[in-house]
Amino acid sequence: MAHNGTSYQDEYQRSIDDPEGFWLEAAQALDWVVAPQQAHSDVDAPLSRWFPDGEMNTSYNALDRHVAAGRGDQIALIHDSAMRETITRYTYNELLAAVASFAGVLRAQGVGKGDRVIIYLPMIPEAAIAMLAAARLGAIHSVVFGGFAASELAMRIKDAAPKVIITTSGGLEPNRKVEYLPTVREALEKAGVPALPVVIKHRDGFATQPADLGFNAVDWDTALAAAVPAAPVTLKSTDPLYVLYTSGTTGTPKGVVRDNGGHAVALLWTMANLYDIHAGDIWWTASDVGWVVGHSYIVYGPLLAGATTLMYEGKPVGTPDAGAFWRVIAEHGVKALFTAPTAIRAIRKMDPEAVLLKKYSLGTLQTLFTAGERLDSDTYHWASRVLEVPVVDHWWQTETGWGIVGNPRGLDPLPIKAGSPTLPMPGYQLEIVDGMGVPVGAGEEGNIVLRLPLPPGTLTTLWGDDQRFVDSYLSAFTGYYATGDSGYVDQDGYVFVMGRTDDVINVAGHRLSTGAIEQVVGKHPAVAECAVIGVADVLKGQKAVGYIVLKSGVSITQEQLQLELVALVRKEIGPVADFRKAIIVDALPKTRSGKILRKTMRQIADGNDYVVPSTIEDGSVIEALIPFLRG
Ligand code: COA
Ligand code: AMP
């Protein structure tokens, strides 16, 4: 452990007592065109601005800076495809050349500072190259996860109004090939921009060719070969770097906006202090570039740190077996792995005694980090036992971009308590409050809120909608950001995160909105009304289950309805929703004002104690529903 002898308590306290000094010092780890003299500004309050007088470029800091420092021949990115059984390596020199050239391709398409670029790519190096190329020009990228269907892509195209879309022939799932081009075609039509330029990275083995669908197509390879490399554009620290859409409580996703300077400073701080990863170390985040974890810790964090980032195209199991993660760690000498608990549960289910682990030497591995969902005690103990390294949970959200609560392994390590992601990270002032905003005592569960301002790297607003940002996060508790999670703090200050207080669910580490699924289910002609809730699942953490009231006079079997609804959700939201269960019921429990009692339903389905509000319209409805919820 290469921690620097600094205690967590000292660092945390300094960040609270002297945030200006703390973050200006952290900012010195970057190269600035104009070094900031001020850390935080609330001139646009309630919106926060970090390093308002600083100027820099994130892509420069992730690539050129390391080449200039003599690390050009070091490996920057390893792409390990378990799907194709290939390994490709890029040095910092090579990655910089590819990014500069692709930035030239984008520039030739008229993309410049402030323009949006949608990236719809699977786990291939071109995803990172496209992101860094956009960042080089000061264009704002928005990556869309490959498991989303055309309607979801269309929604993001409409909201972001991009100049260009970047995609590929397809993605690879263990049981099928995912053709991307028909989805992009449909999304462009739905968004009303059929002639938008589409840059297409050709991949062998897919059926659809660009010409089949009449795209305004630019072939990635041809354009790259002819491109004039582009230099990094000097940006204000506060200029947006990306927009990442995430599920809220409604069907309309929220476009989380991230700035350049605050983001780079915060991520660089975390690489050294939270993850103990430094220049030259080999770091692997097994997630997807379409999620925030992929943005922060497959692409930006490790490259800002001058580390080697491993990008893995495959699954924890079935590609080819439950030893895949161990093979990758051993083959590439990975120092730390970051993944979601669901991936570890999937491995454990297939190989409970970790027999496959014995085939590999994992001597380089120092830490397993998990996030995305709660690390349950069973999984924590199992992983600790078989890997014999610290297993470190940390809690965060798309909105924050980095850990709110964690156990910083680059500082003097803190004791780990199973079930807790440990303590608040620098800059985060965390409190637990009741529904009225009144702080509760140690051990008492309540809403987890963060006192404003949030630290650098956290969202600056929602794309094109400052008011929705304020309404969604800043209005419930004056002076605080509402995380949407509930939890408690124990006597030692350790935070325990218990779950969401809204309609957001987490399926296999993927964040989804039950409201969005309800909207789709409600479109079926047989459905009068429905409630979709997240029910606890041993493998995936949660699963979406629909309870359906049929329109009167409709005759359809349970099996047929389920079949049709599953297909509908898959078509409208995507396979990632993993919606498989729809149950016909006579009625849904409601309050007298007509609000469906989803929370009570969830509590019953999970076998927990439940509270029936006194405002319930008809108590017998909930009684009648219990067997369906528990079944
Ligand atoms: N493109 C297209 N389809 C995708 C996809 C993608 N990028 N990712 C997932 N899907 C599909 C899957 O193929 C599956 O389709 P199917 O119904 O035809 O089988 C469906 O979406 C559900 O996928 P998932 O929930 O991921 O289940 P799975 O059984 O394929 O895999 C795990 C289960 C646990 C192995 C996998 O979810 C996993 O590795 N999770 C880690 C999640 C993660 O990294 N989260 C980020 C936060 S750290
Ligand atoms: P996402 O925006 O996809 O990262 O999802 C964020 C949500 O996932 C949080 O609000 C939590 O509900 C949940 N989550 C993420 N990490 C953890 C964790 N370590 N422990 C508990 N819940 C988590």
Image (spheres, helix red, strand yellow):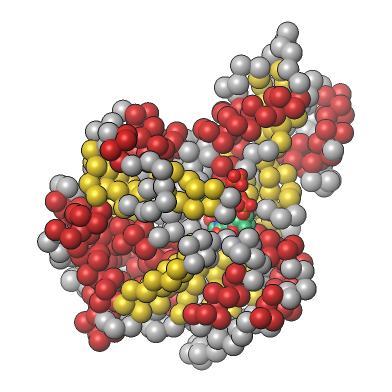
Q: How many marks?
A: 0
> Can residue 166 be seen?
yes
Q: Is residue 240 above or below residue 583?
A: below
Residue 132 point in image, percent of width and height: 29, 62
The quadrant of the image that shows the N terminus is bottom right
The one nearer the camera, 337 or 9, is 337
In the displayed structure, would residue 630 be above or below residue 22? Answer: above
User: In the displayed structure, does residue 355 sit left or right of residue 408?
Assistant: right
From the viewer's perspective, is 257 left or right of 116?
right
Query: Is residue 409 visible to the viewer in this orientation of the structure?
Result: no
Q: Residue at x 25, y 60 (%)?
A: 133
Q: Position of residue 571 (x, y in %)?
A: 53, 33
**Image position, residue 524 (x, y; %):** 60, 21
Q: Residue furthest left?
A: 228
Residue toward you, 164 or 42: 164
Above or below — where is 527 with respect to 494?
A: above
Residue sitting at 76 percent across and 36 percent down?
601
The residue under the point 87% across, 33% down is 627
Asked if residue 623 lies left or right of residue 55, the reply is right
**Whole-percent x and y of residue 370?**
60, 67
Q: Nearer the viewer, residue 371 or 487?
A: 371
Position of residue 114 relative to residue 214, above or below, is below
Which residue is outermost to the top?
A: 553
Instruction: Classify residue 79 by image quadrant.
Output: bottom left
Q: Residue at x 58, y 29 (%)?
A: 568
Q: The C terminus is located in which quarter?
A: top right
Q: Is residue 289 left or right of residue 119?
A: right
